[in-house]
Amino acid sequence: MTETAPARKIAFATFIRRALDDARAMRAWTGTEVSRRTGVSRQTINRWVRGDWASDPEAERVVAFCEGLGLNPAAAFAALGWDRAATPRGAANPPPMDPDVEALLRRLVDPAVSDAEKFHIRETIRYLAYRPTLPLDVRNGGEQAG
């Protein structure tokens, strides 16, 4: 490791702590829930928080952690001192966005919108994203007006 390793560890640990604090405050997620949503083990996250790593974290895990929390991996890469000029994965051609989803995203970043309303928007989106889907035969056969 280089002479800047301690500074990089501190910067990355600070980034991880803030991400965890935000997940707890804004989403009421526990450490277990963060681990489940990001696919990064609690042990790994705890090592990152303590700065207890001999070699750099795997980029794939850093990206998974960030994406699971809705964060830009470039911020984590910057804390690690990695190439900031690199294009984040998928940034070249973003998928088309539904206008209603765009409107929700604008509300989530609007400082005039209350934290309570942002919480309700996130919880509704989370419910819709993770609810079980019905099998095709049930969906197609059970269509009713109303």
Image (spheres, grey):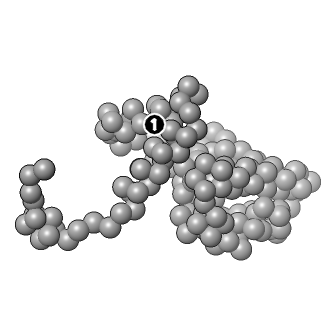
Left or right of 94, for residue 56:
right
Q: Secondary structure at mark 1?
A: helix
Q: Residues within 10 Å of mark 1 (few under 14, many from 20)?
A: some
x, y percentage for residue 86? 60, 43
Of the pair 46 and 134, the residue shown nearer to us: 134
Q: Mark 1 belongs to which amino acid?
A: Leu
- Quarter of the rendering containing residue 132: bottom left
With respect to residue 113, does 48 lie above or below? below
Which residue is at a point 75% across and 68% down the rendered structure image?
46
**Residue that protrudes farthest toward the right in the picture:** 3
Position of residue 84 measured from the top left corner of the image (x, y, whole percent): 67, 41
Horizontal side of residue 128 vs 80, given as left or right: left
Residue 88 image offset from top left, x and y in percent: 55, 46
Instruction: Report x, y in % for residue 120.
Output: 48, 45
- The residue under the point 67% across, 71% down is 42
Name which residue lies at 37% across and 39% down.
Answer: 101
- Identified at 83% across, 62% down, the residue is 51
Task: Check disc 1 and report the residue beneath it.
Answer: 105
